[in-house]
Image: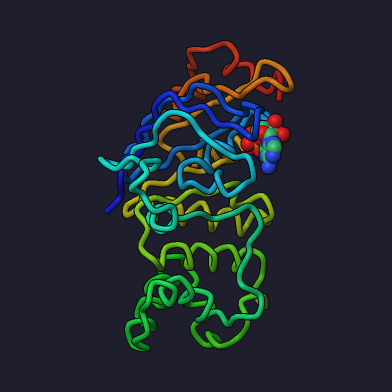
Amino acid sequence: MAKRIDVKDLNVYYGSFKAVEDVSMTVEPRSVTAFIGPSGCGKSTFLRTLNRMHEVIPGGRVEGSVMLDDDDLYSSKMDPVNVRRTVGMVFQRPNPFPTMSIFDNVAAGMRLNGVRNRKVLAESVEKSLRGANLWNEVKDRLDKPGAGLSGGQQQRLCIARAIAVEPQVLLMDEPCSALDPISTLAIEDLIGELKSSFTIVIVTHNMQQAARVSDKTAFFNLAATGKPGRLIEIDDTATIFSNPTQKATEDYISGRFG
Ligand SMILES: Nc1ncnc2c1ncn2[C@@H]1O[C@H](COP(=O)(O)OP(=O)(O)OP(=O)(O)O)[C@@H](O)[C@H]1O
């Protein structure tokens, strides 16, 4: 199920502003890749190109290619809605549908896909909530609003909602930045479990988190404000944190800038 992502020569624009320049990288299936780098270097922008969310922004466009196994995400034959079904996303702030119950939050994507059978929905909701390590905490109140959960529970609900439609890739944009340390650890453990089924890419400002959860780390940087962000290097996480090739990476991870 999990797919390989192959990015080649990608430039990303907001109107005439080139925000990210010339990125090529491969993300292996069933692995976790972390994007790190100083604010404004284009981590989130680049992440959003991996499921065509970038083009939802007015003026947003890309040059280059993003392949998901053998499928070119930006080919004219590709339906962006399908792309976003295949490549799910979890955002910085937990964003459950506020008026929906816990059950309906998780079932929403499946219902959009046309699943109506109550038993099928119930089984998938349970499986997804179990997958997100939330089932035991919510199984007795599935009909209560998702907005009534704690922040960490809401984020796990959003992860359950994302995995319920069985994506092949899961993109996470700073999924723990609004969470306390205990909830953060719960999400990090969960990421470790999810990678047996999904290809995971996570943007994080927290270098310890990158070191804890990821197999590969990609360091992005920008030469100056207003210049495009670039991928400086991507390697095994242990290598990036102990023996990076580039001086800029070493300076960043040792806290000399950023
Ligand atoms: N909607 C937008 N319209 C125009 N420019 C944008 C938009 N979103 C981001 N940018 C610009 O694109 C560049 C990259 O921003 P992006 O948010 O991707 O960086 P980032 O590395 O994720 O930053 P941070 O770590 O602060 O979240 C920045 O110069 C930013 O101002």
Residue at left offset 34%, top offset 87% = 117
- Relative to 147, say whether 3 is above or below: above
The answer to whether 163 appears left or right of 91 in the picture is: left
* Spot occupied by residue 145 in the image (x, y as percentages of width and height): 63, 82
Rendered view: 77 above or below 20: below
Give x and y (percent) for residue 191: 45, 52
Residue depicted at 37% across the width and 44% down the height: 76
- Taking the view exactly as shown, the residue that stands out farthest to the right is 225
Location of the C terminus by quadrant is top right
On the rendered structure, is 65 left or right of 207?
A: left
Q: Residue at x 64, y 28 (%)?
A: 41
User: Is the residue 5 above or below the residue 88 in the image?
Assistant: above
Question: Quadrant of the image for the N terminus?
Answer: bottom left
- Say which residue appears at 64% left-offset and 20% top-offset: 222
Q: Which quadrant would residue 36 be assigned to in this image? A: top right
Camera-side residue of 125 and 87: 87
The answer to whether one can see residue 109 in this image is: yes
Tell me residue 186's x, y (percent). Answer: 54, 58
Q: Nearer the viewer, residue 215 or 17?
A: 17
State whether residue 145 is above or below residue 93. below
Q: Which quadrant of the frame does ligand 1 lie within?
A: top right
The location of residue 223, given as percent across then percent down, is: 66, 15
Q: Report the side of 47 relative to 180 (left or right).
A: left
- Asked where in the image residue 66 lies, by quadrant, the reply is top left
Closest to the observer: 118 or 65? 65
Can I make out residue 253 in this image? no
Count the labels in the image: 0
